[in-house]
Image: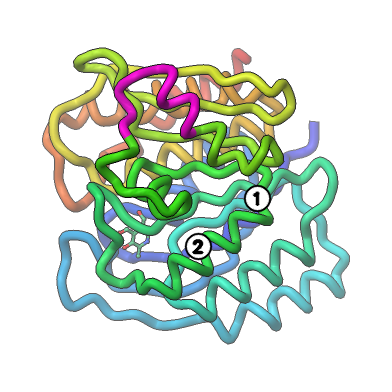
Amino acid sequence: MSVPKVAAVHDLSAYGRCSLTIILPTLAAMGVQCCPVLTAYLSTHTGGFQGNTFLDLTDQMGPLTSHWKRLDLAFDGIYTGFMGSAAQLERTADFIRAFQSPGCPVIIDPVMGDHGKPYRTYTTEMCQKMEKLTALADIITPNRTEAAILLGVGYAALRLDSEPESCRWAERLSANGIRSVVLKGVSLRPGRIGAVCFDRETGCTGFVDAPQMPGQFHGTGDLFASVLTGALVRKWSLIDAARLAAEFTSLCAKAQGTPCREGLDFEPQLWQLGRRMAHA
Ligand code: PXL
């Protein structure tokens, strides 16, 4: 089997695990090649550290897209996440339009916020453009905050503690069934956390969960979406990919125990992900 390739439109934050410092090793452990489309280079991520540097690489994205088109490159998946500016969202849409093809799922993690609030760098314009960008997605992976922003409903109204209600939100996010949805942060039982999945291929909703560790761990959303992406391009079904993502994220949080802004110590656990892929 040839190694599947994922074009990952993300930033590189040098310290504090998130985005590419999670995506590159995770996809590699799953037997997937990651081709980064670098949006920005930061000294740290923006959550929990103050005064980070931000080298904006938006101007590189157009020339990179043209060069890859001239080379006639093709990908088995496109995966996008955190955005640094409104212009970056436009270039990302151009990139997706240039490389989207049948058999190349576009996975958009609409990173915008958490705990009911947008991240401090996200403007209203960026949130509106993110909502437009999700129209290009085959699969979206919002958390509760992002789902509320995408649907234009209040955070408090979007409860994810009952199965029928969670399923209804996931279906609404599918935009009439045209895209699949993995809605994260669903907790139907105390001590468990997971996601409700709407699969546009089958029209069915399903639920996955795993033990929930107390506290907030930075970068769990990126780890979850990376594992999901890796499994999808290795041709796992949506529900199996989401289950693996929930279980592996939980396993890493359990192994670490102490939440911190440096993110999950996921590296020592990657061999387990490799083993799951090898035995699938
Ligand atoms: O985890 C998402 C993410 C990615 N990249 C940067 C971030 C964040 C979340 O805060 O700050 C730079």
* Marker disc for residue 10: 2
Q: CA distance from mark 2 to mark 1?
A: 16 Å
Q: What secondary structure predominates along the stretch shown in magenta?
A: helix
Q: Which residue shows up at 45% across the image and 35% down it? A: 183
- Pick out the residue farthest to the bottom: 59
The image quadrant of residue 268 is top left
* Magenta stretch bounds: 159-169
- Look at the picture and state if 101 lies above or below 185: below
Residue 14 percent location from the top left of the image: 33, 65
Which mark lies nearer to you, 2 or 1?
1
**Callout 2: SS:** strand
Task: Write down the residue under mark 1.
Answer: 137
From the Cβ of disc 2, is ligand 1 less than 8 Å away? yes
Identify residue type, mark 2.
His
Residue 69 percent location from the top left of the image: 83, 71
Is 103 on the left or on the right of 8, as rendered?
right
The colouring scheme, among rainbow, by chain, secondary structure or one colour, is rainbow
Decide which of 15, 200 is in the foreground and name it.
200
Quadrant of the image where one finds ligand 1: bottom left
Residue 256 percent location from the top left of the image: 19, 31
- Look at the picture and state if 152 lies above or below 204: below
- Look at the picture and state if 176 lies above or below 82: above
Is 238 on the left or on the right of 223, as rendered?
right
Q: Which residue shows up at 71% across the image and 44% down it? A: 105
Quadrant (top left, top right, bottom left, bottom right) of the N terminus: top right
Can residue 166 be seen here? The reply is yes
Q: Which residue shows up at 15% across the image and 40% down it? A: 259
Decide which of 95, 230 is in the foreground and name it.
95
Quick one: label 2, few (<14), some, or many (20+) residues within 10 Å? Answer: many
Q: Is residue 167 magenta?
A: yes
